[in-house]
Amino acid sequence: MKLFITGGTGFFGKSILRYLQTKYSLGGSDMPELVVVLSRDPDKFLFQYPEFGKLAWLKFHQGNIGSASTLPLGIKFTHVIHAAADSTDVSKMSNLDRYRQIVDGTKNILDYAVHVGAEKFLLTSSGGVYGQQPSSLMTIPETYCGMPDPLVAHNAYGVGKRECELLCALYGERFGLQYVIARCFAFVGPDLPLDAHFAIGNFIRDALYEKVISVSGDGSPFRSYLYQDDLAHWLFVMLLSGATGQAYNVGSDQAISIADLAILVRDQIAPHKQVMIRDKVKESSDRNRYIPNIQKAKLELSLSISIALQEAIRFTAKKYV
């Protein structure tokens, strides 16, 4: 196997590279002979993460998904993981720019996969493609065909990801490209930024460095979190064994309210600190939920959650202690 990865220097990418590094050290038989990671600035990444600079099986190529001419030529890849799309520092991007990056970038990588004769293409999509989770659904199954309102510009990410899924289907029909969709939800791990818009990362940061752990809203939304090692394992299994033309939810189905999450983070890292919830809970039984149904991944691919949330929080915090 020769594997090409976009987004290989982001949270998903670092999770995959650490997973592969561990698998190589254990002598895994299904490991790629070559992994090439696309990066806009490989030197900067390797300066920050020198552990990836001396691996014989791993190479970096300077380029950008938005510019097809910068993609590596002259190499035939058997597998492609397309995980590139900024989800952390998006404040500097307009909604239109973000949409173009997601959709145009995916089209470029699909063209590239066809050009190099890839046998399998994995798109990391998002649970955001479903739109708001209905109150009647405790968990969202892959068969739910909702989507974000396309008339709301702020929905550029979710609508763009939904369009990328359609592009995969079109390329499968036109060129016979074997593709799998991974609809990814929420995650935690040592490579998750603590200063972005991820609630669990912010809570871990507060538990480590601030006087109180601050919940910016009323704490009532429900979320769930999969550890980054499980994320990487799930993605790799889907790349190798996922059914062509199918989408699989990737995440945890173990729901927790944001308020309880802050308390759990406090209890695991800094039991002496106070949790401060800024807003009062509103009188409503319709709580915001973002929880995947993962039965399809469990039953078809024998995937499971191997790291409990409590452990995941401790493992994440350990990086900074």
Image: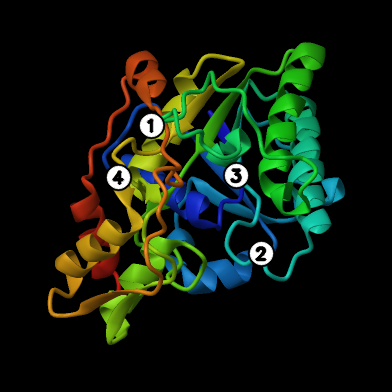
Q: Which residue position holds label 1?
A: 138
| Disc 3 from disc 2: Cα separation | 16 Å
- For marks 4 and 2, the one nearer the N-term is 4
Above/below status of 144 relative to 149: above
Of the 4 image quadrants, the one containing the C terminus is: bottom left
Q: Nearer the viewer, mark 1 or mark 4?
A: 1
Residue 83 is labelled as: 3
Q: Where is residue 12 drawn, in percent x and y?
A: 50, 49
Q: Which residue position holds label 4?
A: 25
Q: Nearer the viewer, mark 4 or mark 3?
A: 3
- For marks 4 and 3, the one nearer the N-term is 4
Q: Which residue position holds label 2?
A: 90
Whether tag 4 and tag 3 are in contact, CB under 8 A, the answer is no
Q: Where is residue 11 drawn, in percent x and y?
A: 49, 56
Task: Tell me the kind of residue under disc 2.
Answer: Val
Task: Tell me the kind of residue under disc 4.
Answer: Ser
Task: Tell me the kind of residue under disc 1.
Answer: Met
Along the viewing direction, whichever of 101 and 122 lies nearer the viewer: 101
| Disc 3 from disc 1: Cα separation | 27 Å
Q: Nearer the viewer, mark 3 or mark 2?
A: 2
Whether tag 4 and tag 2 are in contact, CB under 8 A, the answer is no
- For marks 2 and 1, the one nearer the N-term is 2
The reply, left or right, for residue 124 in relation to residue 219 is right
Q: Nearer the viewer, mark 2 or mark 1?
A: 1
Q: Quadrant of residue 128?
A: top right
